[in-house]
Amino acid sequence: MLGVLIRNAKNLILGWGFCVPLSFLVPKKKNLVLFMGRFGGEFLDNVKFLYLYLHSLKKNNVKYYFFTEHKSVYKTLKENNLPVLYHPTPLSIYILLRTNVIVVGSTVWIKKCKYHLLFRSKKIQLFHGVALKKIELGIPQKAKYNSSLKGRLDNSIRGRFPLYDLCISTSEYCTENLFAKSFRAKTFLESGYPRNDFFFNAQDNKYVFLESDPKTISKINPLKAKDYKIILYAPTFRNVGSDAVSDGVLDLNALCEFAVKYKVIFAFKLHVSSGIKHRLQECENLLNYDSSKDIQPLMKISDILITDYSSAYIDYLLLDRPVIFFPYDYEKYTQTDRDMSFDYDWVTAGPKCYSQKELHQAIKNTLEREDRFAEKRHQIKDVFFKYKDGNASKRVWDFIEKQFITSQP
C-alpha cells in the first residue's frame, strides 16, 4: 500500500503537475514517430518489424527513432546505423514531448511518467501476440478493479488502460473476442502482425536478425542440413514461476535420450525467470535459445512447435507445421494464473499431452505418421487471420501515415 501511495504521489506531482502541462507547451512535430519495445525497449516483436519496415521505405518526410532504456540495444542499433534513442537523457525527454505518434508493443510503456510526457501523442498499440489466455481488461479482476472508484482513480493517475488511437488485430473474430474486450481504442485494424511478415518474405533484410540469438541459430542450421528435426519448445509465462521441469513433469535426461534416438534437436525458448536453461547444457540435443531475444527467426527454422497456452501457437499457424500441446497443468493454470479467452479444446489443433510419456509418443507419431491435424489447423488459421501474406507492416504503416502524419488538421 505504501508503495502504491508513493508511486501515485510521484505520478501526481511529476506526471500531472509537471510533465502533462509541459506537453502542452512543447509543440508536436507531426512527422515524428517513436517506437517503444517491451520491457524498457527490447528490440523484438511487432514494434521491431514495423520499425524495420519503415526504415526500409527510406522516407525523407518522416523522422523516427527506436526508443530503448537498454544500453546493449542502443549500441546494437547504433552500430548498424539505425535511428535509435537512449532514455533517459535530456534529448530523449525532449523527443518524447515532441513525438506525434508513439508505437508500443506492451502496456508497461507508461512507466516512469512516459505516459504523461506522451499525453498528447497519438498512441498505437501493436501488442505482442494473439493470446489464448485473457489479457488486460479481459481479466475479470482487472476489469472489476478498473470499474471501481479506487481503480479508476489509481489507473487515471498512472495512465493505465489509456484510450489508444489504434489497436491492431489479426481478424474480425480476434477483435471481437479478444482485443475489443482487452483494450480501449478508437479504432481496431485487422491488419495482421508485422512480425509475421518475416515468415513470408525472403531473408534479405540483415536487420531482422538483430537481437535474436545467432549463436544458437548457428548451431541449429548445420544440424537441420543433416536432417535433424528441430522442435521448438515455447511454454507461456506463469505468474507462479513454475515450469515443467521444476513441477516434476519433464525429465531432461529422458528427453535427451529420446532426442538422440530420434535425431531431434529441442530448442527451448523459455521465460526469463525459468531455471531450466541452466541444465540444458548437459545434453547436446537440448539447446537454450536466449529467452530475452526475438523468437521469430527460431520459429521459421523449426519443424514442430510444442507449447501450452502461448500466443506463439497462433503465429505458428501461418507456417502450417505440426503443433503439439503440453498443457500438463491446465486446471492449475486456469485457476491460479489466467482463464482462457477461447475454448481451449476447440482452438488447439494438435494432440494434447499431460505426461512426458504422452509427449514422447506424440512427437514420435508426428515424425513418423501423416499430419492428422493439418485440416483443423487450416480451419483455425482462417478464423484467426484475415490476411495470410507478408503485408501486415504495410497495412499498419499506411494507416498510421494517412491518419496521423499526412492528414490535414
Image (cartoon, grey):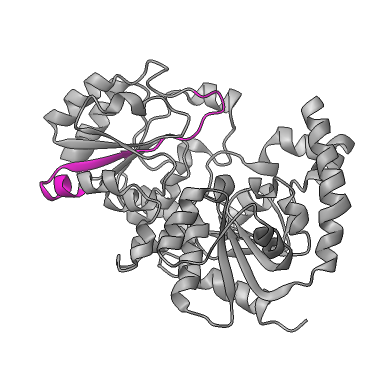
The quarter of the rendered structure image containing the N terminus is top right
Image coordinates of residue 408 in percent, x first then y, are: 74, 84
The quarter of the rendered structure image containing the C terminus is bottom right
Determine whether 52 is above or below 153 in the image: below
Q: In the rendered structure, does residue 20 fall within the stretch colored magenta?
A: no
Displayed quadrant of residue 269: top left
Image coordinates of residue 294 in percent, x first then y, are: 41, 49
Question: What residue is rendered at 50% in x and 72% in y?
Answer: 54
Q: Which residues are magenta?
A: 221-241
Residue lying furthest left? 226
Q: Is residue 115 left or right of residue 371?
A: right
Question: What residue is rendered at 62% in x and 68% in y?
Answer: 33
- Which of 273 and 29 lies nearest the eye of the viewer? 29
Determine whether 79 is above or below 250 in the image: below
Q: Is residue 43 left or right of residue 21?
A: left
Q: Is residue 232 visible?
A: yes
Q: Is residue 193 left or right of residue 152?
A: left
Q: Is residue 384 visible?
A: no
- Which of 185 and 223 lies nearest the eye of the viewer? 223
Determine whether 152 is above or below 190 in the image: above
